[in-house]
Amino acid sequence: MSLLHRHLLGLEGYPAEDIQTIIDTAFTFREVLDRPIKKVPSLQGKTIVNLFFENSTRTRISFELAQKRLSADTVNFSASTSSLKKGESFKDTVQNIEAMKIDACVMRHPTPGAPLRLTEYVDAVVINAGDGTHEHPTQAILDMTSLQEKFGYLKGLKVGIIGDISHSRVALSNIHGLIAMGAEVILCGPATLIPPHIEELGVKINYNLDEVIEWADALNVLRIQMERMGVSLFPSVREYRSLFGITTERLANHKKEIVIMHPGPMNRGVEIESAVADSDQAIILDQVLNGVASRMAILYLLLGGKAES
Amino acid sequence: MNIKKISKKVLLKNGTILDPYAEKEFLGNVLIENGKIAKVGKINTKDASVIDCSGLIITHGFCDNHVHFREPGREDKETLETGSRAALAGGFTRVCAMPNTDPPVDSPESVRFIVEKADTCPIHIHPIGAATKGQLGKELTEMSGMASEGSVAFSDDGLPVMDGGVMRRVLEYGGMLDLPIINHAEDLCIRNDGVMNEGRMSTRLGLPGNPVEAEGVMVHRDLELAKLTGAKLHVPHISTAVAVKNVSEMKKQYKNISAEVTPHHLFFTDDYLNEFDTNLKVAPPIRSQSDRKELIKSLKNGTIDCIATDHAPHTIEDKEATFDMAAFGMIGLESCLGATLNVLVEEAGLDIMTVIKALTVNPRKIMGFESDVFSEKTPVELTIFDPVETWEFTKNDIFSKSCNSPFVGRKLTGRVKYTIVKDQIALI
């Protein structure tokens, strides 16, 4: 089974059956990761470059590990956008890399749309590892893989996405993916951090976290960036925590089981209390492991592999 | 495009003469003698060189009150000379050049530089002087001295005069000289880091949005201050229904208000940004379909007076960047007629007279230029075009030094054939 699109740029308009294929393939690779020798020869001879125009630790390591587990050759390129501002254009950088004959580019870039531009400049398969505040499709797929692992289904699942929606590529990709898979989504966060017209994507907004907790099967808690405080998007950590912080005390009031996710890195004590992050209901570390398996599945399917039976 | 000197006596024969000043349309001829209009109507003459205009419309040369010709400072993007060629290709015989050059045109000396340079160009170019020194929005420029050198209006275009107190002084002082004040109407605080229209599309693309209120609020402020001071206010590149409503309301109370719209705000909607095309990154941004519909309606009912291109050339590398880093602006002179006739006549069913008035008489009146271009002894400024030809706009149709146009590859309606000005005829 192969995927409809040659690249993975985002989950907007991405076929549900392809998302399911990736998730199913990810579970196959989860088994590989449990073996004593965690390596398969699937992508032997393929060269993949990781283009990181923005700092990233976990996404880059997760991709690199996925590539190594599949026996691909990998090259890493890191550049801060400030060096691009100084001279070399985006186009020059990527064309130089393309000239070195590679099969796939995994790219993290601060600007929305940069991966689409990349497809115009290079022949390689392009995988978006996060483009600014636009999409982060592999994160959404690993989140959905984790939800499917936990619940066994996605259709009809009730997911609350909590926090800074405006500046979150994770939120946007999760919304597109979850809606495509038939899940229900409610967004909850300060009004200053929820983008206008987002309801048109098929989600609801509720500013009352307790109501969302009462409703949801799972919460995806987003990282709140402290620098947003300075530009008066929210007034203080204290106020944020009291309105939108996930605490044991708040969860205890609801007397229900709820699954807690976080794409990381966490601000412990701000959007999520340590005790919650370390509790049994949190599947945050499962997400990390599923991240490697999901990215193995994506690379495998996009680079000419077939889903294993 | 072929540009050559016109003969002593030229007869434009068998055209449809569209006189936007008299609002008349009839079949006839135009006789040009020694570079001036000799006669319009039925003409029998033997010794003139003849241009067959059958099937074509002969009208006033178009006038664009809003272009960026980048000279001095960014001659790699455009010069007065190359900009003139783009204008000729679009049927424009007269343009007003914005002062946001490097350095800005903010003194009598820099106005004189433009006027002297423009003298050698094949079209009429009028400088618009900066409203504040260095376009910094703080201190008034020497508007009287600049006016004496040839500045026809004042603007900090590219940037708004953000301080309302300063804007009031600009209007008071400019009003004393009876010249139009043009304020780039975007509240920068509301706009914030917005790079496209705020709406469903910006949310989908993850790009920071610029809400319609950024324009609406600023236009409202400027209109109130114009009424307070009695100055002439011209609202450039109006892009939103809310701003149009503000203009419409104020026009009922106060007469010295005019507004322009660009072909690109009439033609495109933010849905076209689907693939992050940086050629569609402009300020103010391309708006939603409902805003676009309102702009078309307002041009029809006269709330919007004229069409101006906001021709803004940029180098390939300025545009071949990621969306956040790409420059704001697009070129527009060459594609203007085809785009506007396509939207306004073919799609929206306006009569061609309304559109041509918005390209000729109306912009001339706003700037105080002679607007009865067909009257005898007027130095010739004529445009001859095919009103129904449908054609694909390509890079070959661009004469600007830059090629940042989202119209490339699109179907347009109506095509300029000849532009006659300053004793020369351009065959497009």
Image (tube, helix red, strand yellow):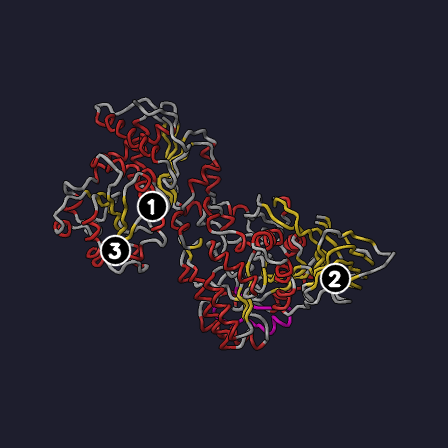
- Give the mark nearest the N terminus, 3 or 1: 1
Question: Viewer-proximal residue, A13 or B102?
Answer: A13
Image disc number at residue B380: 2
Residue B36 seen in this snapshot: no
- Residue extent of the magenta highlight: B137-156
Q: Name the residue under label 3.
A: A207
Residue B393 occupies quadrant:
top right
Residue B229 seen in this snapshot: yes
For label 2, count other residues whose C-alpha is less than 10 Å away and answer few (under 14), some (14-19) or many (20+): many
Please, what secondary structure does the residue beneath circle 2 have?
Answer: loop
Residue drawn at x 64%, y 72% as measured from the top left: B148
Please state which amino acid type lies under the numbered disc 2. Val
Please, what secondary structure does the residue beneath circle 3 have?
Answer: loop
Please state which amino acid type lies under the numbered disc 1. Leu
> x, y (%) of residue A59?
31, 38
In the depicted structure, whether residue B129 falls above or below residue B268: below
> x, y (%) of residue B173?
54, 76
Disc 3 from disc 1: Cα separation: 18 Å
> x, y (%) of residue A192?
31, 57
Q: Is residue B175 one of those drawn in magenta?
A: no
Q: Give left or right: position of B279 versus A218.
A: right
Residue drawn at x 38%, y 30% as measured from the top left: A3
